Image: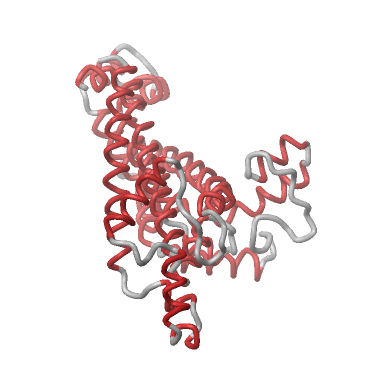
Amino acid sequence: MNITKLLIRRLLYLVVLLLGVATCVFFISKMVPGDAVSAYLSPRSLANPDIVNAFKDKWGLNDPIWVQYSRYIINLIQLDLGISIRTGNPVMEELIRYFPATLELAFFSILFSAFFGILFGIISATKRNSLIDQALRALSVTGVSIPSFWFAIIMLFIFYSTLGWAPGLGRLNIRTIAPLQVTGSYVLDGLIAGDFDAVKDALAHLILPSIVLGSFTMGLITRTTRSSLLETLSTDYIRTAKAKGLGPTAVIVVHALGNAAIPVLTVIGVGFGNLLGGMVVVEKIFAWPGVGQFAYQSVLGLDFPAIIGVSMLIAVNYAIINLIIDIMYGVIDPRVRESQ
């Protein structure tokens, strides 16, 4: 099966998946304890049935559940996620405003994870059972095991509060003017505008949260790269390549690494999806104005349209990332493409 047919098949799966996720998210939100009426009306207003009914009518809470669900699916098809009860703005606009900050942080985190994870995995596999192998394996276990909230606090205490090497919270220093928004990424927007001071400041603010968020995925990538590479290095064609006189670097880079890439690619994809959907605590600690902050505030206020919108965004992120990974499987390994 060629790439085009594979892409069409995966896109059909994607539509069915998102419909199922949307249905589950809608009905689960209806079963969550608490309601928006109690969260947004004062005790005095709650005692007035007219005010309560007016609030419910405004947000469609008096309609039968199947009517609410039908309206929700129709709006979702039109990319309408409803109005945030907390802010009064369309949820889609809020997500568009917050998502670039999360995407920028997730990108630099996965870049850190992939670079050092693959590098450490290669070194660990080629230096098997040596002291450096043991040290890198211990580092990977530490990265997987350390709680992100505790690691974030420690990093801020050491490098910001004590040593003063890292900048403060947020995306930019208060004295730095944000570049004109084009993509929502301060690094890209600064490069587009030629504002290299803003680029430098934005990169400096990305270092600590990227390390904190990327440490878990880096540990997984290191362990996966090591185990996959060791398995590949034990195959017959690698022994043949060595017998032909190829050097260690050529054997690893040209022959072994490509065949060991699929498990590593899977971990990178899943890790990137986790970063896009699991930054709530770290964004809160670093005062990072992303989707995690928006989700946190929405949950506290029982803002169900916003909660559903964030859930759908996370589902779409995972679905798109898995689609890209599936396509890359077919590009990297013809056996995968032909088996579809």
From the top left corner, tell me how far across and down residue 193 is, in percent: 76, 37
From the top left corner, tell me how far across and down residue 252 is, in percent: 37, 25
From the top left corner, tell me how far across and down residue 14 is, in percent: 31, 35
Residue plotted at (63% across, 40% down): 183
Q: Is residue 136 visible?
A: no
Residue 15, located in which quarter of the rendered image?
top left
Quadrant including the N terminus = top left
Q: Please name whichever residue, 331 or 247, is drawn nearer the observer in this view of the structure.
A: 331
Q: Is residue 7 above or below residue 151?
A: above
Residue 46, located in which quarter of the rendered image?
bottom left
Q: Please name whichever residue, 278 or 85, is drawn nearer the observer in this view of the structure.
A: 85
Q: Please name whichever residue, 18 or 163, is drawn nearer the observer in this view of the structure.
A: 18
Left or right: 204 as drawn, with respect to 328: right
* Tally of marks: 0
Q: Is residue 222 above or below residue 339?
A: below
From the top left corner, tell me how far across and down residue 31 is, in percent: 27, 67
Left or right: 59 as drawn, with respect to 196: left
Q: Is residue 85 visible?
A: yes
Q: Please name whichever residue, 90 or 201, is drawn nearer the observer in this view of the structure.
A: 90
Q: Is residue 72 above or below residue 47?
A: above
Q: Is residue 200 above or below residue 289?
A: above
Residue plotted at (36% across, 47% down): 315
Residue 326, located in which quarter of the rendered image?
top left
Residue plotted at (57% across, 57% down): 89
Residue plotted at (30% across, 44% down): 129
Q: How is the image coloured?
A: secondary structure
Q: Residue furthest top?
A: 244
Quadrant including the C terminus = top left
